[in-house]
Image (cartoon, rainbow, N blue to C red):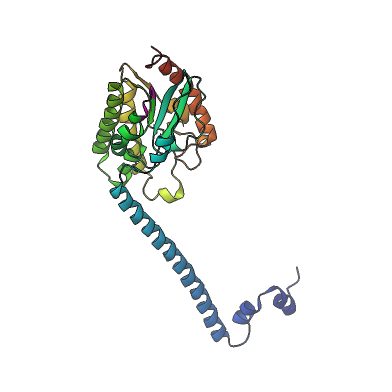
Amino acid sequence: MSERTENEEIQDTPPWLYMAVHGGDTRAMRWKLACGISLLALSASGLANVGLFRGTIAQIHEKFEIQLDPTNERRFVEDNRALAPPPPGARRVVFVGDSHIERWKELPEVGGAQLVNRGWSGETTAQELLRLERDVIALAPSVVVIELGSNDTKCVGLFPGEGERIASSCHKNLSLLVERLLERDVRVVFLTLFPVGEPDLAHRMVWSGAAIHAMISAQEKINQAFVAMKTPGLTVIDSDPVLAVGGRLNPSYTVDGTHLNQAGYRALNGAVKPVLEAALATSRGAR
């Protein structure tokens, strides 16, 4: 191939770059180029710092909002007040838990049931204990579906070495939730903690490697304890056979490595529907 002529090179090269390399006051042009690049880098850094500042402020607001209102009392006030009674012959089923419940928009179709979603994203088992009376028992359900605990076990990644304590506290709180509902003659369908998926890039700084394994270990202990329970009025659905592949959340069932997509909820509905129908058949009002 023939060498490029100077004219061709001039035409194909931005003027500022050609002058910096070939012409004019070379030292001055290169200094200007370095200054320009530095200015762009500083601008990008400034924008990044603004983003970090806003994110920090948002986290501080969220932290103090939780401290002021740990059970998110305002969240369901109007919904609970406006909730219509079940249709004649139907019984109420309340779904309660964290973001997995809140995002469950298309609940299983079950005849003779009024399905009510009282899921709250970010909720821990301790918070649910505090709002159980207000947002669940006060609605007089015949059956309650519980999915909860992953926001507790996530803390294993933040507090290394605390896995045993966190798992024990989570199991105790979940057991108390079930106990209080059974005492009210409410049937309970308990979904074990969902399998852990691959965290997205933003969360890998905290939840990766040893932290993920510790979280999985904590969840397995809690799940095994509930699967082994043989308590009248309680039915436990093991989520792993429904949602897991190779012990981890099925990638085709998740939008971000944590939350389910529509396919995941369809699989969940297929597992929950027959169990819910059986629970309703023996619930109060059917006996």
Where residue 239 appears, as percent x and y from the top left, is: 42, 27
From what the image shows, is residue 18 above or below residue 242? below
> Height in image: 12 above or below 133?
below
Residue that sits furthest to the left in the current view: 165
Judge left or right: residue 64 versus residue 54: left
Quadrant in which residue 5 is drawn: bottom right
Instruction: Decide whether residue 66 is among the magenta residues.
Output: no
Q: How far from the left and from the top, in percent, is residue 204? A: 41, 48
- Residue 118 against residue 24 in the figure, above or below: above
The residue lying toward the viewer, choosing from 1 and 75, is: 75
- Whether residue 76 can be seen here: no
Q: Residue at x 31, y 43 (%)?
A: 155
Q: Quadrant of the N terminus?
A: bottom right
Question: What residue occupies the far bottom of the structure in this picture?
Answer: 25
Task: Name the side, left or right, on which 19 lies relative to 217.
Answer: right
**Residue 146: image x %, image y %?**
38, 29
Q: Nearer the viewer, residue 65 or 238?
A: 65
Q: Main secondary structure of the magenta part?
A: loop
Q: Which segment is the magenta one?
A: 139-143
Identify whether 259 is placed above or below 87: below
In percent of the image, x 53 and y 77: which residue is there? 36
Give the total number of marks visible in the rendering.
Answer: 0
Compare residues 88 and 128 and report the one nearer the observer.
88
Front residue of this view, candidates 212 and 174? 174
Examine the image and state in which quarter residue 132 appears: top left
The reply to whether residue 242 is in sight is yes
* Residue for point 50% across, 31% down: 265
Q: Residue at x 63, y 82 (%)?
A: 19
Q: Give the quadrant of residue 278.
A: top left
Name the spot of residue 181 as percent of width and height, x first. 31, 25
| Figure quadrant of the C terminus | top left
